[in-house]
Image (cartoon, rainbow, N blue to C red):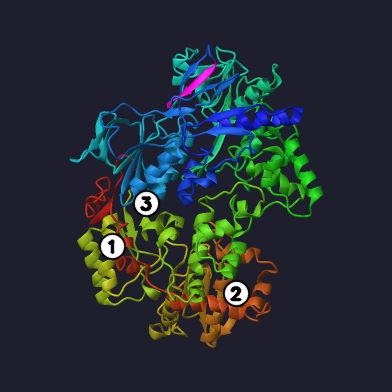
Amino acid sequence: MVAHRFVSSLLEHAQDDGRPAPAVTVFGAEDRPAYDRVRLSSWFDDRDPAGLHLDPYPDGAVEVVAPATVASVDREAQTVTTADGAVRSYDTLVLATGSRPFVPPVEQHQAPGCFVYRTLDDVEAIAAYADGRATGVVVGGGLLGLEAAKALTSLGLQTSVVEFAPRLMPLQVDDGGAAALQARIAELGVNLLTGTRLDRVLVDDAGVACAVQAIRGEEAVTVEADIVVFAAGVRPEDSLARAAGLDVGERGGIVVDKLCRTSDERIYAIGECALAADGRVYGLVAPGYQMAEAAAAHIAAESEGRAFTGADTSTKLKLLGVEVASFGDAFGAAEGSMAATYSDSRRRVYRKLTIAPDGRLLGGILVGDAEDYGTLRALVGEQPPAAPEQLLLPAGAAGAVSIGPAGLPDAAVLCSCHNVTKGAICTAIHDLAEKSDAEVTPKQVGLCTKAGTGCGSCVTSIKSLIKSSGSGGSSGLCEHFTQSRSELYTIIRRDRITTFAELLAKHGAAAQAQGQRAVNDGCDICKPAVGSILASLGGLLAEAAGTGRKPHVLDGGQAALQDTNDHVLANLQRNGSYSVVPRIPGGEITPDKLIVIGEVARDFGLYTKITGGQRIDLFGAQMADLPKIWRRLVDAGFESGHAYGKALRTVKSCVGSTWCRYGVQDSVKMAIDLELRYRGLRAPHKIKMAVSGCARECAEAQSKDVGVIATERGWNLYVGGNGGARPRHADLLATDLDDDALIRTIDRFLALYIAEADRLERTATWVERYEGGLDRLRSVLIDDAEDRGADLEALIAAHIDAYTDEWRAVLDDPVKLARFATFVNAPDAPDPTVAFVPERGQIKPLLTLGRR
């Protein structure tokens, strides 16, 4: 990436000066064009390397020789010799050889099954080897290690991370930030072993890696591993410079001055291979780009040009779905510095600012909520406009102050990769808006200024400035889609799109930006959201295709879109075990079925708990036991209760008029009818319902997304209620409905919610913000004011016709069934890290090493 930036800058200098472009030859060891290593992990989303390729050089401007490894440099003759013996002369030589992975010199580190995580070849090899395997270990808990962990989890492997330091990301976050990060990641099922030293790789009789042995304190720990990925840092690739007699640092790196010249003034070194004039080796892309600019300016102008005296090492990224950012003097190393912190252990959020004695902002750490990163980073060295404590508080909290990029001075640098100021970005936005009535996009701003085209951490700030300028401002789902969730729903249904890849290719942000390099990955925002839409529309899409079969959430590419629980059709618990919740419609169950549940719990050693939704939850299941448990339950007439998905959970009921002397309608029958009608219906968020047989409201229907209360003349319908942290009383939508009208109105309500709600938006929030309020919603659903009734009802009808039990579908499909194994070479073996202790006649989790 740094070499590509250097060459592009050199050509730009020649063009700006009106001079002929220099003759440039690029030697690359990989058999690929230059690509974006920062986004290497995104390859796993669609496995298309073209999506990572950087913009090609102008035709005929550069000779690229690849694959070709330069074996030696003859400084006196000013030539380089490749491994195959070809000799080329140079006037100026630039070394941008990057770095090489550091692999701890432990026993069997080169055994089959051991990989490094650095290049496209590496990730392709990892993906190929991981196919059909169950467990993986990543050695290293820094930036690269967590990226590798994300890759392994996306491949369906039970993943462990071994980190020698006492916390994850020790160079970027402090203990408080690491605690929040580790809690978030552990919730995803990743086994974290910090303060742990890798001792050796264990191999089986065939010499293939099968586990790792590590030391934590005085204790030896063995972790099963079908694949081991070393991501424990990098070392400057300075071997070519050493052999040529150039000065190198004591701990590696080619020594350069502020113009990036080596000890031979005709040779430059830039990027991760260079030891900068400030004595540091920079392992981030932004400093590498600045080195590239400095070297290109000096070579083009043959003058002092732009000097590189150090760089901003601020970083913002999303690791396993967790936002992490650090900037400036994050650890408060400056003399006399002070810190203000905000920590919310429930939400797994940690925010810290370091302050100089005179009140200037020095730096900060943000974990779990990095929305303000761009603004806060730009304020480093300045007096913040509000007290640090106020800047740290979450939006909406009493006393919180949010500045936003619009409140920064024009001189504030928002894009550190390309040193682009807020003023330059605002000027570009204004100029673009003047030229066209179309909405200004971050991609267009990037074309004009380069802002947002490096690491991408400033894109959020650019979007904010576009919005505040009145020039559009994207309401898109994420960086990959400019459309909202509801707009994507409409597109998928209209165009009958059946895969995420097809949607991204036809309607993704890159597809909409002419002249832009394709962005072929997704993220943990758009992938589950699109996966949910595809599942919601599965019946309609199957009907349109004439297949009659609704796709399963674990079919092909659909499986890669699912959240953690949906991946295994069960709920992950804190010790790595799973819970199983069979559907019990309306809370009604026969003695025989109760006995089956008891026998299953007894035979598999499960903890049983009656839930608030009138079901029985079975806790403590091992991954390999899930299909066996499902088989017993399915054979007895049970099916999935969808407790793991954003779908209908339960329809709670009282006993109604059948048994209760106060009941006026058969609430149990209605609850069962509704649950069987909407079972498996995927939505933006979970849906809970209840039916009460009289006004005494024993089923608590007015606290549910859909609540039904019996009257003498029929049913009253309530919508938009919920309990939880922000309880909301449901709104009365209609009164005295007969059975048909009630079901028709609920059909329309759920279909409209699925079509129009935002990602992860409960019905309570959606009803509150519905344009026109409850009266308008009532007219749309009951009076069919928008003539959408038949269309909304068709969605539910198609869902009902195409419904299949997700558990049974797995049991009937050997390919899906193979996913449910802890160890590929011992499919029935339990996970030895999952343990329990007795309590009150049942079990509870034993939180062992890495499971706290």
SS state under label 2:
strand
Q: Is any atom of residue 512 visible in this view?
A: yes
The numbered dot on residue 732 is: 2
Q: Earlier in the sequence, mark 3 or mark 1?
A: 3
- Which amino acid, by three-letter code, is at mark 3? Gly
Q: Quadrant of the N terminus?
A: top right
Measuring from the top left, give residue 834's x and y in whole percent.
Answer: 27, 48
Q: Secondary structure at mark 3?
A: loop
Tell me which numbered mark, 3 or 2, is placed earlier along the sequence: 3
Residue count near mark 1 (Cα–Cα under 10 Å), binned few <14, some 14–19, many ≥20 = many
**SS of the residue at dot 1?**
helix
Q: Residue at x 41, y 60 (%)?
A: 556
Examine the rendered structure and indicate whether residue 85 appears above or below residue 147: above
Marks 3 and 2: which is nearer the front? Answer: 3
Q: Residue furthest right?
A: 434
Which residue position holds label 1? 627
State the extent of the magenta-drawn residues as a range. Answer: 78-84
Say which residue appears at 52% left-offset and 64% top-offset: 533
Task: Please provide percent x and percent y for residue 757.
Answer: 59, 64
Labels 3, 1: front one: 3
Residue 666 in picture, x, y percent from top left: 44, 84
Using the image, tell me which numbered label, if any, was put on residue 156.
Answer: 3
> Is 80 contained in the magenta span?
yes
| Other residues around mark 2 within 10 Å, as few (<14) / some (14–19) / many (≥20) | some
